[in-house]
Image (tube, helix red, strand yellow):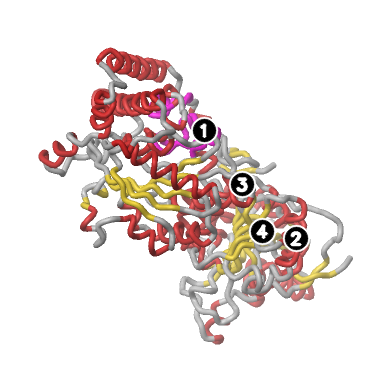
């Protein structure tokens, strides 16, 4: 199989869906010529023109609201919102409108909009350019939320998201854009709402998202040399959540560790822990553990920022403790 | 009303239809107020009494596939756009036969078949959504237009700025219709902005802006028709500020804070009164015709009320329906399998 980067996988997904469906168009800041901050959309302009790749002024609430209106009228906008830290600027249209429109029309409307954001710390961009805000949108019925961790998942999930008739918030960890991975050349889709076991193991279920999937996989390698086999489970979609796969894994391993980059308090990990405690209580041999950032803003200086981000070592230490 | 306000496009039959729509809206609103005070209703009524000329005058010349996104006082828009009175009334009652089957408040109803975009209760959020509808028309190369209604208060939202600017730079077929009724709940407009006319703000976006008498149905009709023509021709958006006044409190639970003198002066400038005087003067209306219209609309609203009373509420379990296009809510949780 050929290898491409996460960035190229996203670009391919968008390109294929734009070719498949004339109603798909892109909107965002600085996307047409530049291709966006991380140049994910580079090269699309010459193929599709300014009519379908629309540069917007700095008006996040304005163009996310416009995407909702355009989606209601039979188009499929894919919005590049840049940083997930900009979600709050557009939150009214995401939470009060995109998510609720179908309900408001008694099922007679659909809002097929995808809002792509990149997220996460690690590039010294400071506290309003580095957050992991997925819990904000997971808390909103009417939305779907995806967070792929590999190029293949990114492509398949984004294609599914664009075809989905419901609004999808699509989280891309900025440190993953350069990551290479196997991606099939033939057409495929990964449905929103299906988890994937990235590495099988019998000792501890580690549910990880985004960049943390890779830290969990690195931890798994090291732990394996000690004879500990962790199962790394990537939900890939947070809403809907594939809790069946998670619960089945816990029933197998009897231990659950959840790892996300977002801060723990009010974080999505709490939801998974609650589900596990209810659905797999009798199977658990150790308290459920969570790893996440502390309740502080993402710091700027590399020393502080590095200390902030959950690490492979944190996973290793926690797994050892859970098995001791 | 002077002669210049009439429109050659409007025939006698149109004038009577428009008058009837205004009377029907008034009858509907006043009956809703009465039912609300006597028995209570799920909808907290935010009535358009006194502002009927704006909805009727602006929607009357539209095509069925043109869209509107009404403000929170949109009943004259719904009625002129063709929503059946029984459906509206069922919506007010929260019945299963209402526009959203009881999922959403009727005074912000949406109806894609009649070209109505649902509003939210968030004042001023309608600008970007209406702009997006117009963007879809442009992308699909249709010549539909979208009318976006809002009050004076909403024009202070950031979304007003973002929405109008986006509409302007892409020359989108959207017409912004301000219903300046002089108050945002109790706050007088002069305490919320330093300019006298909201239409002035159009200059900031490089689009035409006019201020008109919103209680004059012909002024509304003519200004909107001109803006619609411009929009269909690809020349972009316009802002029309209709000066008006609501003759009921902000909502039917709200204690009136405006003076009786002020209210009385505006009752004298009531849009229906004004239209009626014009029609009587031109001998287009007489006692007999007027009586007939009055009886008919009363009957129509009464029938709708009876039907709404007799209609079923949605079943409680229907709460779980219509949330997602793909995916069901099982045990309170979204599932896709």
> Which stretch appears magenta?
B88-116
Percent coordinates x, y for residue A251 in the rendering:
70, 51
Q: Secondary structure at mark 4?
A: loop
Which residue bears the numbered disc 2?
A15
**Mark 3 → mark 2, Cα distance in angstroms:** 20 Å
- Say if mark 1 contacts mark 3, CB within 8 Å: no
- Say if mark 1 contacts mark 2, CB within 8 Å: no
Mark 2 or 4, nearer chain start: 2
| Residue A260 placement: quadrant | bottom right
Which residue bears the numbered disc 1?
B114
**Mark 1 → mark 3, Cα distance in angstroms:** 23 Å
Q: Secondary structure at mark 3?
A: loop
Q: Residue at x 87, y 68 (%)?
A: A2
Marks 1/2 same chain? no
Q: What type of secondary structure mainly makes up the magenta span?
A: loop
Check if residue B91 falls in the magenta segment: yes
Mark 3 or 4, nearer chain start: 4
| Label 3: few (<14), some (14–19) or many (≥20) C-alpha neighbours in 10 Å | many
Please identify the quadrant where the C terminus of chain A is shown.
bottom right
- Say if mark 3 contacts mark 4, CB within 8 Å: no
Check if residue B289 falls in the magenta segment: no
Horizontal side of A315 relative to A21 (left or right) equals: left
**Mark 3 → mark 4, Cα distance in angstroms:** 21 Å
């Amino acid at each position: 199989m050929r290898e491409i980067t996460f960035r190229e996988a996203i670009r391919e997904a968008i390109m294929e869906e734009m070719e498949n469906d004339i109603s798909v168009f892109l909107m965002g800041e600085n996307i047409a010529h530049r291709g966006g901050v991380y140049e994910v959309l580079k090269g699309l302009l010459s193929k599709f023109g300014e009519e379908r790749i629309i540069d917007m002024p700095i008006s996040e609430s304005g163009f996310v609201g416009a995407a909702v209106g355009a989606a209601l009228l039979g188009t499929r906008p894919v919005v590049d919102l840049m940083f997930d830290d900009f979600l709050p600027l557009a939150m009214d249209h995401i939470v009060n409108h995109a998510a609720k429109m179908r309900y408001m029309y008694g099922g007679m409307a659909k809002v097929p909009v995808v809002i792509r954001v990149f997220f996460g710390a690690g590039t010294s961009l400071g506290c309003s350019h580095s957050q992991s805000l997925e819990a904000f949108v997971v808390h909103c019925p009417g939305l779907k939320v995806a967070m792929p961790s590999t190029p293949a998942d990114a492509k398949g999930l984004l294609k599914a998201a664009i075809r989905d008739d419901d609004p999808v918030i699509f989280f891309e960890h900025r440190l993953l854009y350069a990551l290479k991975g196997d991606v099939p050349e033939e057409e495929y889709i990964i449905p929103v709402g299906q988890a994937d076991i990235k590495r099988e193991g019998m000792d501890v279920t580690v549910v990880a998202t985004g960049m943390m999937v890779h830290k969990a996989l690195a931890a798994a390698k090291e732990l394996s040399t000690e004879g500990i086999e962790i199962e790394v489970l990537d939900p890939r979609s947070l809403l809907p959540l594939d809790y069946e796969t998670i619960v089945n894994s816990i029933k197998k391993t009897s231990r659950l560790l959840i790892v996300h980059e977002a801060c723990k308090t009010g974080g999505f990990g709490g939801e998974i822990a609650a589900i596990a405690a209810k659905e797999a209580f009798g199977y658990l041999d150790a308290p459920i553990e969570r790893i996440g950032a502390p309740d502080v803003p993402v710091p700027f200086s590399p020393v502080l920022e590095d200390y902030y981000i959950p690490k492979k070592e944190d996973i290793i230490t926690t797994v050892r403790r859970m098995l001791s | 009303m002077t002669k210049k306000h009439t429109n050659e496009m409007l025939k006698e039959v149109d004038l009577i239809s428009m008058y009837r729509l205004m009377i029907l809206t008034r009858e509907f609103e006043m009956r809703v107020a009465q039912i609300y005070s006597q028995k209570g209703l799920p909808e907290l009524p935010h009535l358009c009494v006194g502002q009927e000329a704006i909805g009727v005058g602006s929607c009357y010349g539209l095509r069925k596939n043109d869209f509107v996104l009404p403000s929170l006082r949109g009943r004259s828009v719904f009625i002129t756009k063709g929503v059946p009175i029984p459906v509206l009334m069922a919506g007010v009652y929260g019945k299963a036969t209402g526009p959203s089957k009881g999922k959403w408040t009727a005074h912000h109803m949406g109806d894609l078949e009649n070209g109505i975009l649902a509003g939210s209760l968030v004042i001023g959020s309608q600008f970007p959504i209406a702009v997006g509808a117009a963007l879809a028309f442009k992308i699909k190369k249709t010549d539909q237009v979208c009318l976006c209604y809002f009050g004076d208060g909403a024009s202070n939202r950031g979304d007003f700025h973002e929405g109008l600017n986006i509409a302007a730079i892409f020359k989108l077929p959207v017409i912004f219709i301000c219903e300046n009724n002089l108050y945002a709940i109790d706050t007088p407009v002069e305490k919320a902005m330093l300019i006298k006319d909201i239409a002035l703000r159009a200059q900031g976006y490089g689009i035409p802006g006019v201020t008109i008498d919103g209680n004059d149905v012909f002024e509304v009709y003519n200004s909107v028709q001109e803006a619609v023509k411009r929009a269909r021709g690809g020349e972009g958006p316009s802002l029309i500020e209709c000066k008006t006044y609501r003759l009921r409190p902000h909502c039917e639970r709200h204690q009136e804070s405006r003076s009786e003198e002020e209210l009385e002066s505006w009752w004298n400038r009531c849009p229906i009164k004004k239209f009626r005087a014009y029609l009587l003067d031109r001998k287009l209306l007489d006692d007999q015709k007027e009586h007939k219209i009055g009886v008919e609309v009363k009957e129509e609203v009464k029938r709708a009320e009876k039907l709404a009373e007799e209609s079923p509420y949605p079943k409680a379990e229907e709460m779980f329906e219509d949330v997602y296009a793909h995916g069901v809510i099982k045990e309170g949780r979204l599932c896709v399998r």
